[in-house]
Image: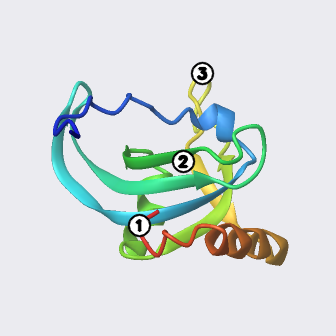
Amino acid sequence: MTDQFSNPASFTGVDWNELNGGLILVDVLGEEIDMVTVHGVTNAIRANVAVLDGDLKGQTFDDILIFGKGLRPQLKPKIGGMVLGRVGQLPPSKPGAKGAWIITDSTEADKTLARAYLKAQPEIAAPF
């Protein structure tokens, strides 16, 4: 008999430092508005993220929230679609601050890699 109950998924947060320079494919699911966090009320993008190269190649982050001041505005207009690019970081806006995380444009080689990834995932139409 199959148990009808399952354990919760493990918490996996994205460490953007580990992804810096890496190629990611983001399935942009939606936007969460007026979320109450320890830092106040904010908006976030809900997404699935697949890492396509680098040390974390093959890792996926499913149904995560992306809060970044650089990432959120890049992803919001793409809700319902996929974004492909490399993780980067802007220079800090002031001394002692950290630069915002961003996604830089993909190359043709990156697109070829992403197409191969999606083709190898037949169960993935969207979301992945």
Q: Quadrant of the N terminus?
A: top left
| Residue kind at label 1, given as amino acid type | Pro
Q: Position of residue 37 (x, y in %)?
A: 21, 31
Q: CA distance from mark 2 to mark 1?
A: 12 Å
Left or right placement of residue 45 versus residue 88 in this view:
left
Q: Which residue is mark 3?
A: 96
Please tell me whether mark 1 sits on a helix, a strand or a loop.
Answer: loop
Q: CA distance from mark 3 to mark 1?
A: 38 Å
Q: Which residue is mark 1?
A: 127
Rendered position, 51 above or below 15: below
Q: Which mark is residue 51?
A: none
Rendered position, 109 above or below 4: below
Left or right placement of residue 121 versus residue 82 in this view:
right
Please tell me whether mark 2 sits on a helix, a strand or a loop.
Answer: strand
Q: Which mark is residue 60?
A: 2
Please tell me whether mark 3 sits on a helix, a strand or a loop.
Answer: loop
Give the mark, 2 or 1, whose residue is nearer the N terminus.
Answer: 2
- Determine which quarter of the picture holds residue 115: bottom right
Give the mark, 3 or 2, whose residue is nearer the N terminus.
Answer: 2
Q: Nearer the viewer, residue 78 or 26?
A: 26
**Which of label 3 and label 1 is nearer to you?**
1
